[in-house]
Every structure is written in structure tokens, then in C-alpha cells.
Image (spheres, rainbow, N blue to C red):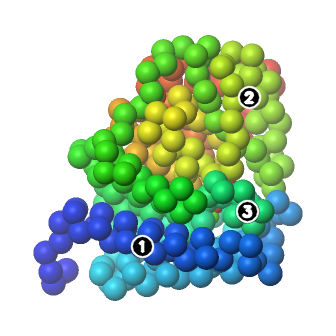
Amino acid sequence: KTPYVVTSKSYTAVAINAASKAGEWIKTRLGTVTQLTTKSAVGDLVTEVDKGAEQMIRKLIFTHFPDHAILGEEGVEPGPEASAKALEKYADEEYLWIVDPVDGTTNFVHGFPFFSVSIALAHKGEVIVGVIYDPSRDEMFVAEKGKGAYVHGKRMKVSGETTLEQSLIATGFPVGRDSTLPANMAGLTHLAPKVRNIRCGGSAALHLAYVAAGRLTGFWEIGLNAWDIAAGALLVTESGGQIGDTKGGAFHLGIRQVVATNGAVHAELVQALQEAEATGFENS
Ligand code: 2AM
Ligand code: CA
Ligand code: CA
Ligand code: CA
């Protein structure tokens, strides 16, 4: 159907180009946001920058791959089932791009320099390219299925800690997601005394990139969507790490309770989260 020959290399080039162009533009919009709108809840912000960046990325992808489908956060109706519904809608697409134009919108709005652009390409449901760009630090994290993951052109490798006690673990707060607050608090209460320390940066995608780069031992968060995790998941596995759900289940694009680690502490982190859940707070 496609009238030209494309290789995974050119998919990656387009993903990098889109993330870099959108990221540079987002950076120029820092401190300029005048209109704040909330989506599903008070903590769930969206700006004209989220929408503008998504439009830029869509245009670039469609220019090169007009018969591919694109699932972007700002292109779907917000709500708890947003990502599941979209994945169902696009289930028959051979090539699906999954885009989060600004991951960490709250940080962007406040000028806290920890946000990212996340772009993934899935082929028949499997992520084959993942790119996460941090414009504040000008860091481009790139993964290709079976070919490794890179930052600044250097191969990434997950960190070497072997116990939770030695681990730096990140999580995300469920502001605007009331239903996940008790489970998140139970996880924090249970995990905090077991780990070296906990970080909460505010961009799930960038946390996954940091696990891949060995800057974090692991990460968990409850209530995420496909656009938060698609690119990061490939970065983590191509760097030798592991990603799945909080119950120890395998990764797929529909998981919402996410655990990613260097692999060595994965079972221990999953077990600790299960223990936290057993205190009465079901992850939902
Ligand atoms: P966003 O900035 O793209 O919305 C922070 O904990 C992480 O959760 C970020 O990746 C953020 O992505 C995401 N997030 C923020 N509000 C959310 C909501 N209401 N539902 C689901 N995810 C959310
Ligand atoms: Ca959002
Ligand atoms: Ca996001
Ligand atoms: Ca977003």
C-alpha cells in the first residue's frame, strides 16, 4: 500500500525530528501561558502549548507517513478510559504513532524544568521506535526495537543496584486522579523505609528515560495512559531493564499500573507494592 520503501531508521529519524522541533518550540513558550484549562479534574491542566505541539508532531508524521494512524493525548476525549478506548479504536492499524506532546504539563506551566515530548511507533501493537526529548537539558533519548537505546548518541544501560535498599525510586502523584490517591499513598508509606530515597519529578515519560539511563533504579505510577509509557517502555527494555504492571504482569500498551526497573530489583519492588496493596488499598 505504501508507495515508497521505508526502513525503521527513517521512522526513527522522523520521530527524532518531530520531538526535537516540538521540544524547541515548547521551550520558547515557557512562561508565556495565558490560558489554563482543566480537563477531567482541577489538577489536570492543558494549555495551548500542549495542543500546538501535538499539531506540529501530527503534521510532521503525516507528511512522511500519510497512511499511518496517530494516537495523541490531546486528540482524545479526556477521562479514565481515554487510552483504552483509543487503543481499541486503532487496534486494526498496522502502524500507530503514540504521542504525548508535553509530558509534565504542570511542570511546564510552573517553569519547573522537568517535562518532555514522548513519541512512539507501534507496529501491530508492539513498540518498535521510542523517542523522549527533554528540551530543558537538550537530551534526546532514542530506542529502536532490537537495536538498543541511546542518549547523546551513547548506548544506555540501566543501573546496577541489586536491592531496594540501594535503590533510588521515582513515582508520580495522582493529582487530579482522586481514585488512585489512597493506593499511591499506601505505596509511598510502604516503600519509603525500604529504599534509598524516592523522587517525584512529574513526568512519567522522563522517569522511564531516567530508568533506562541508569539515573533511577526504578519507577512506579498508578493510572498512566499509553502515551505516557509507550516510548519509555522501549527505552527501558532496550537498556536492559524491565517494565510491567504492579502485579508482576507483562507489559502491553494498555497497562495503567506501571512498574519499570533495572531488572535486578523488579521482583522486590513488585512484591513491596503488592504488600502495600494488601494493606487495603486496591490499585484502581
Ligand atoms: P501529563 O503532564 O502529560 O498530563 C505525573 O504524575 C504524570 O501523570 C505525568 O506523566 C502526567 O502527564 C500524568 N498525568 C497528569 N494528570 C493526569 C490525569 N488526570 N490522569 C492521568 N495521568 C495524568
Ligand atoms: Ca495531560
Ligand atoms: Ca503524560
Ligand atoms: Ca501530556
Q: Quadrant of ligand 4?
A: bottom right
> How far is mark 3 from mark 2, CA to CA?
28 Å
Whether residue 96 is visible here, answered yes or no, is no
In the rendered structure, are the residues bearing label 3 and label 2 in contact, judged by CB atoms less than 8 Å apart? no
Q: Residue at x 39, y 81 (%)?
A: 60
- Is 178 on the left or on the right of 93, as rendered? right
Q: Which residue is mark 1?
A: 18
Q: Residues within 10 Å of mark 1 (few under 14, many from 20)?
A: many
Does 225 appear above or below 238?
A: below
Residue drawn 48% across the image and 46% down it: 209
Say which of 123 and 89 sits in front: 123
What amino acid is found at the position of numbered circle 1 in the picture? Answer: Ala
Q: In 3D space, how far apart are the residues under numbered discs 3 and 1 (Cα atoms)?
A: 22 Å
* Location of mark 3 (residue): 111
Q: Quadrant of residue 116?
A: bottom right
Looking at the rendering, in which quadrant would you find the N terminus? bottom left
Amino acid type, label 3: Gly
CA gap between label 1 and label 2 equals 36 Å
